[in-house]
Amino acid sequence: MSSEQSAATADQHRAANSWRVAEVIAAHFETDASHEGAARTLRLRAPGLGSELAGQHIDIRLTAPDGYTAQRSYSLALAEGGDEAEITVEELADGEVSPYLVRGIAVGEQLEVRGPVGGWFVWHEEDDWPVVLIAGGSGVVPLMAMARRHRAVGSAARFIMLYSVRSPDRVIYGDELHELASDRAAPFDLMLFYTREAPPESTRPPGRLTRDEVATAAMDEDVRFFICGPTAFVETVANRLIDDGFDPDRIKTERFGG
């Protein structure tokens, strides 16, 4: 690496670790806004905020008039680099930050951001091994960044997404996921699993993702897993894979707290 490249990399690291102001330049709901627990995508702009590594996240800090601050991490839904980034936030009934990001902040307003950060739970476009993406609820967000990057770079690596979600009205990115799965030029398959309410056309009764369903999706011994969702979901799925003999080094996990 040249001295110029080293200096540029150092500048990027410093920027990622510094708080700065981002503007909300676009926003839309991914699920029905009238329902509790709606999900909303925010597109943000700040210098160096975009990432080309699918799976990274940013930190957001809100400050109240009395000086009280609340900070949360949100996975990036896109990996396209530049100064713009997207996050998708699911409203939590007892949440401190998510209700404001889903219902409060408007296009044109600003908030404090830091990042992008994270180098473990990421998919690298040069990797050619098959991948199983396993999402629980809003855990689909970083996996969607991987699916979008996978398509954008024309990767030949086979992707399968297993998406466990409460009911059809809670599916995030539904139309885009189905469109990705229908594109025969992209080696991407989608399997939806409803835990509480399934659509009328579903032949699978509502229920949690089973060990057999995960094992069936594991294509060959070289497969890599990315699992994201609530802690209990992630630990259950990951532990079953390990018990079934899959190499722990090929299982990457990320947990969403409350």
Image (cartoon, helix red, strand yellow):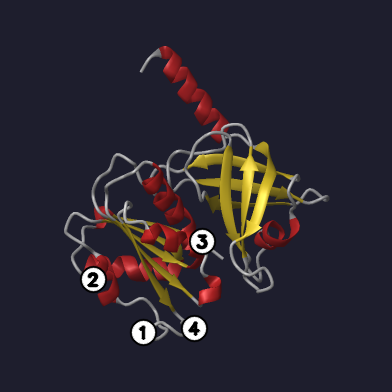
Q: Amino acid at mark 2?
A: Thr
**Quarter that holds the N terminus:** top left
Q: Which residue is mark 3?
A: 173
Local packing at callout 2 (Cα closer than 10 Å; few below 14, some 14-19, many 20+) is: few
Q: Earlier in the sequence, mark 3 or mark 2?
A: 3
Q: How many dots with numbers?
A: 4
Q: Residue at coordinates 51% horizontally, 69% vertically from top-left?
A: 171
Residue 116, placed above or below residue 9 = below
Q: Residue at x 65, y 74 (%)?
A: 35
Q: Where 115 sits versus 65, above or below?
A: above
| Distance (Cα) linking label 1 and label 3 | 22 Å
Left/right of residue 243 with respect to residue 22 in the rendered view? left
Looking at the image, can residue 63 be seen?
yes
Amino acid type at circle 4 is Glu
Q: Is disc 2 in contact with disc 1, using a CB cutoff of under 8 Å?
A: no
Mark closest to the chain's N terminus, 4 or 1: 4
Q: Secondary structure at mark 1?
A: loop
Quarter of the image for the C terminus: give it.
bottom right
Q: Residues within 10 Å of mark 3 (few under 14, many from 20)?
A: some
- Mark 4 and mark 3 lie on one chain; the one further toward the N terminus is 3
Residue behind mark 4: 197
Q: Which residue is mark 1?
A: 203
Q: CA distance from mark 2 to mark 1?
A: 17 Å
Element assignment for label 4: loop
- Residue type at numbered disc 1: Thr
Query: Which numbered disc, 4 or 1, marks the residue closer to the eye?
Result: 1
Q: Could you tell me how far apart the alpha carbons at marks 2 and 4 are, in whole angstroms?
A: 23 Å
Q: Which residue is mark 2?
A: 216
Secondary structure found at label 3: loop
